[in-house]
Structures are given as C-alpha cells and as structure tokens.
Amino acid sequence: MEPKLLKTFRAVCQTGTVAEAAIRLGVTQPAISKRIAALEKSLDTVLFQRIGVKLTLNEAGKKLQPIAEEILSLIELRKNEILELDARIAGDLSIACSHHIALYRLAEYLKQFHQCYEDVNLHFNFTESEHAYQLVQNGSVDLAFLTLPANISSSIHAETLWEDKMQIMLAKTHKIYQKEKRIDSEKLLQYPAVLPEKATFTMRRLEMAFQHNVISTIHGLNANNMETIRMLIEAGLGWGVLPETMHREPLIIIDSPQLDISRSLGFAYHKKRKLNAPARALIKLFYRNELKDN
C-alpha cells in the first residue's frame, strides 16, 4: 500500500468528503477519487459507503483505518529520525508568502518543519504574490512562496512546486445558470466577471489563456485575494476563474476544454542572497514530501 494512498484514505476518513480532503492535501478532487479507487482496487474491496457527497467507512474501511494510521506513524517516525541526522539547524528564517499558498498549501509542511527544527525562528510576511516577489528582488526576505510570474528576473532563482489548475466557476444562483440550458465560455463573456486585479501575476496568466483583448474588455469586479473572489462569485455577482482546490457548493465548474488555465506556485529567492541553513532545510522538506508529484 503506497503511503500517498494511505494519506489520502486518512484525509477522507477525517474530513468525510472528497472536496474537503482535496483542500487538506492541496490536490484536486479527481486526484482524491483516483487515489481512493486505486487503494480499493489494490485491496480488492470497497472501503466507503457513499451517500451524496458524504463518505463513511464500511466494515472493511474500519478495519483498515488503524492499520493505515500505524503505517503512516511509522513512516513519519523514520522520516524524523533521518531528518535528525542533519547538522543542528537554528537561527532566523524570513519568509514572504501569498495568502492563497498559506491557506491551501503550507500548513502541513510548516508543522513538520517546526517539529524537526524547533530552534529556527520563523518570521512571516503574508502578502500578495506581487509584493512577495518585490521583497525577494529587494533582498528583504530569505525565501518567498508565491504565484510565479511568467517572466522571472535573471537575478531570481525560482522553482515550481505545484501546477495550480484553474477552472471557470459560477454560482448556481446566477441568472445565466437559470436561463441557459448549455453554458460555454463564449456565453459567459457576455456577462460580468469577478477577476483578479490587472497587475497581478494570476491575471496575466488569464490574459495568456484567453485572448488578451477579450478578457481586458470584460466588465465586472476586481479583487486580489482568491477568497474574496470566491465570495463574490458565490454571491452571484459574476463568474470567475478559481483554482480547482477552491471548488465547493454552491459553485459549479463550467466545462471549457478549449481553455487550458493554470498557474505555477512555487518558491523564489535572490541569487545574491545566500540561502541560510534553515531555508535550505525547508526546501529539502518540500522535496522529501514529493510535492511535485501532486
């Protein structure tokens, strides 16, 4: 049984839904469903009772749960023992982090980092990705976690940790959902949208996915924070584009196969600002957890 499948099983057990498990693990809902199906196939048995969106353990699932916890606990114990072989790491680590990454991606890894390196003093600046990038350019922080811009300065080292798939979303209460039998992206362009501010890295990604002139002429509302954008979409004030990990009721996803919308989330640091030991340890921790495979 693969650890990744067992971690997914545990997340679904704890949250009770595929959607909440996807948010917790920072992956898409289809990825969660695929992993659960793979685990059930490997065991040749069904593990959950499915009632609507709610998943509850059946008898086979209840028997597997303590076994999965024991296996995952042993893996974590051995991982920590390996980490402790590293030289003693202490000191300050300054991090700029986008609000979205802080909310949906970072928590579990910071928890592991703190458990392994208690003597590191973490200093955070939670901000927008554009400001985080400026802080890196100015040499004001050791490390930044952010939405990466399409064009990165030659003085900045950046690496992608997550490809953040995005989807067009709409509230069920929106008049176009009530009015149209079939909704496509062309019809949506006739209605107000809720989009990121024009100068943001995410908006530039959207301009690349849509025709630049088309999306720049759409009327509606603008906001920087993805949580704010989702709230405005849920209120029926317009359609918008959100990461798949943010999908929840009462939003629906509008199928748009002609559009490939995604953004790169990752870390960046200034090449002339040498990474200190805590920063190197944090980056190693991300790759130990194989975030790129997610």
Image (spheres, grey):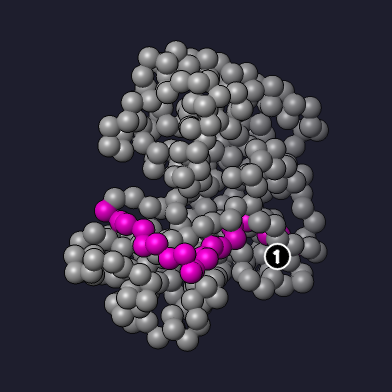
- The x and y percentages for residue 291 are 63, 44
Seen in the image, is 63 located left or right of residue 201?
left
**Residue at coordinates 72% horizontally, 72% vertically from top-left?**
153
Disc 1 secondary structure class: loop
**Residue at coordinates 48% horizontally, 16% vertically from top-left?**
64
Work out whether residue 110 can be spotted.
yes
Seen in the image, is 79 located left or right of residue 253?
right
**Residue at coordinates 50% horizontally, 21% vertically from top-left?**
44
Q: Pointer 1: residues within 10 angstroms few (<14), some, or many (20+)?
A: some
Work out whether residue 193 can be spotted.
no
- Whether residue 267 appears in magenta in the rendering, the answer is yes
As displayed, is residue 235 above or below residue 124?
Answer: below
The quadrant of the image that shows the N terminus is top right
- The x and y percentages for residue 49 are 33, 26
As displayed, is residue 199 above or below residue 81?
Answer: below
Among the 4 quarters of the image, the one containing residue 187:
bottom left
In front here: 144 or 17?
A: 17
The residue to which callout 1 is attached is 139
Seen in the image, is 280 located left or right of residue 16?
right
- The x and y percentages for residue 118 are 64, 33
The quadrant of the image that shows the C terminus is top right
The magenta-colored residue range is 250-270
- Magenta segment's dominant SS is strand
**Residue at coordinates 44% horizontally, 75% vertically from top-left?**
197
Instruction: State how many labels appear.
Output: 1
The disc labelled 1 sits on which kind of residue?
Gly
- The x and y percentages for residue 231 are 31, 60
- Whether residue 23 appears in magenta in the rendering, the answer is no
